Amino acid sequence: MIKPKRKNYAALLIDLDGTLLNIDLEKFVLSYVDALSDRFTGLVEKQNFILHLFTATARMVDNNDPCVSNKKVFYEEFCRLIGHSLKEIEPIIDNFYETDFPALSRWGSEQPAAKAVVETARSKKIPLVLATNPIFPATATLQRLAWGGLRAEDFDLITTMETMHFCKPNPQYYLEIADKIGYPPEECLMAGNDTLEDLVAAEVGMDTFLVEDFILHRQGTDYSYDYRGSLEDYLALLKALD
């Protein structure tokens, strides 16, 4: 039994992929990139498209400008690289997420304890943030949430590329969340399975819980954590809070 360090937390942050959602991340990303690149056949050669997609994503992850949304950073770079305007490609992107992205649900499934985690947080009236890396648009995040059997209305905040200005593993991402929900980071608990992207929340003063069901180890990272265990253990911790 994991004993909580404190009686309560002002807010709970929790990751999605590999934490609340069972997902084969490698196969999901490969299928995602392949399907999206096929949509741009005739506009951009496939290998160039993939290169530009990852280059623009890296630019978004590296952004430190609090005045520019992740979406704006990504599309400014991506459109510049492929030589087409956002007005030209936005219908393609929108149609992809409406008709093609749902098929990627084959790589995701429900995490048995996820619903109980959400229900426990709600019953205790603890604000709950879906702190998934905001590199995807809202539609992709909400669809993945549904693959896990969860609902958008279960969360007080869901981070997406439209609404956030930083990405994991930038510590500013966690400070922006704290600012949005109105609680000091020192009173928040972040839970996730990534030893870098989730545990880096400790840099801003948040307590952290390493969910070990599907741990993603990042080479060269040695962030400590306050708790470690399965999602079931995390659930038990929540139940022990006041």
Image: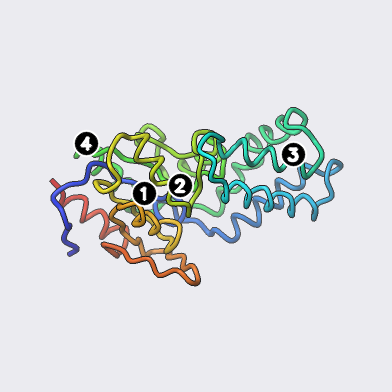
Task: Specify few, some or many for label 4: CA neighbours under 10 Å numbering under 14, 14-19, or 20 or more.
Answer: few
Local secondary structure at mark 2? loop
Question: Dots 2 and 3: beta carbons under 8 Å?
Answer: no
Q: Which mark is residue 132?
A: 2
Q: CA distance from mark 1 to mark 2?
A: 7 Å
Is residue 35 rendered to the left or right of residue 160?
right
Q: Residue furthest right?
A: 42
**Of pointers 2 and 3, the one earlier in the residue sequence:** 3
Taking depth in this image into account, of 42 and 21 the one nearest to the observer is: 42
Q: Is residue 233 visible?
A: yes
What distance separates the C-alpha of mark 3 from that of mark 4? 43 Å
Q: Find the residue positioned furthest to the top.
A: 87
What is the quadrant of residue 69 in the picture? top right
Q: Earlier in the sequence, mark 1 or mark 2?
A: 1
Q: Residue at x 55, y 54 (%)?
A: 107
- Which circle's residue, 1 or 3, is located before the other in the chain? 1
Residue identifier under label 4: 125
| Viewer-side label of 1, 3 | 3
Which residue is rendered at x = 49% and y = 67% of the image?
A: 218
Q: Residues within 10 Å of mark 3 (few under 14, many from 20)?
A: some
What secondary structure is found at the residue carrying circle 4? Answer: loop
Residue assigned mark 1: 14
Q: Amino acid at mark 2?
A: Thr
